[in-house]
Amino acid sequence: MLNLEQYHTWVFDCDGVILNSNHLKIEAYYATAKNFGADDQQAQALVDYHIKLGGISRFVKFEYFLKHILQRPITHSDVEVLLQDFGREVRERLANCEIAPGLWELREKTASSNWLVISGGDQAELRTIFAECKLSPLFDGGIFGSPDNKDGIMAREISRGNIRLPALFIGDSRYDHESSSRAGLDFVFMHGWTDFPDWQAYCTRHNIVTLPNIKALLAA
């Protein structure tokens, strides 16, 4: 059983936890690769790499796409074209994205704690989407994302006193678990919307608490 009242800070991943957006991001990566001139196999290779590195910045994924999949030099201009196009593809898809049920009720239940979003998604894009969805007021600790990675963001926010231990990270990827553990946060894996194919074996191996969704936390 989780003791929700013990946590001073709650940290949430975005895709697959707050928003049912993992499948939309997969579609956006595939479309971006095709728009850039990749064939079907190359576009699928980018999607496979994205799934393998769940929670990692899109900057890293597009550099890999250029160097290892297309086998061409990594240039700032090409990365910028990919980032801009991917951002457009994502925004189009997230306009009516499903939001996790129970989020506002959980906020009321944990009113004495501060909440943060720490995501692999683009920080400016995240803040715009959360404002449009009227979710920003929930996250008084801030909404953070790439180009900074999760390890760096958590280290910075702990040093600032914005993340106060004991703290809980709620995520849906291997990197979420690894980075939050390195920072000293407890971790819960949300599996209802995850795109991590081996999540069950991974969570069993590491004795991770798993729940299907945010609403399940209300009954924890």
Image: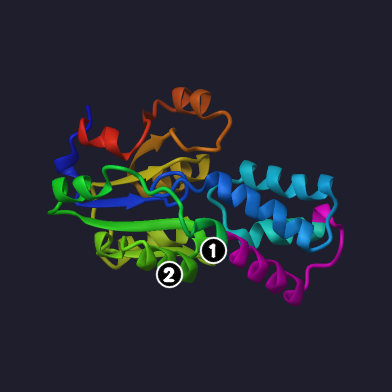
Q: Residue at x 46, y 40 (%)?
A: 172
| Badge number at residue 219 | none
Image position of 30 (left or right of 130): right
At numbered mark 2, what does the secondary structure look like: helix, strand or loop?
helix
Q: Amino acid at mark 1?
A: Arg
| Badge number at residue 128 | 2
Q: Earlier in the sequence, mark 1 or mark 2?
A: 1
Crowding at mark 2 (Cα within 10 Å: few <14, some 14-19, many 20+): few
Among the 4 quarters of the image, the one containing residue 214: top left
> Which residue lies most toward the bottom here?
77
Q: In the picture, which quadrant includes the N terminus?
A: top left
Q: Amino acid at mark 2?
A: Thr
User: Circles 1 and 2: CB distance less than 8 Å?
Assistant: yes
Residue interval drawn in magenta = 68-90
Q: Nearer the viewer, residue 49 or 6?
A: 49
Q: In the picture, which quadrant includes the C terminus?
A: top left
Q: Residue at x 62, y 61 (%)?
A: 89
Among the 4 quarters of the image, the one containing residue 137: bottom left
Crowding at mark 1 (Cα within 10 Å: few <14, some 14-19, many 20+): some
The x, y position of residue 76, in whole percent, is 73, 75
The x, y position of residue 123, in whole percent, is 47, 67
Q: Is residue 84 magenta?
A: yes
Image position of 147 (left or right of 61): left
The span from disc 1 to disc 2 (Cα, nearest Å) is: 10 Å
The x, y position of residue 110, in whole percent, is 16, 48
At numbered mark 1, what does the secondary structure look like: helix, strand or loop?
helix
| Badge number at residue 91 | 1
Chief secondary structure of the magenta portion: helix
Asked whether the viewer can see residue 156, the reply is no
Give the total of numbered labels: 2
Q: Is residue 152 magenta?
A: no
The x, y position of residue 182, in whole percent, is 42, 47
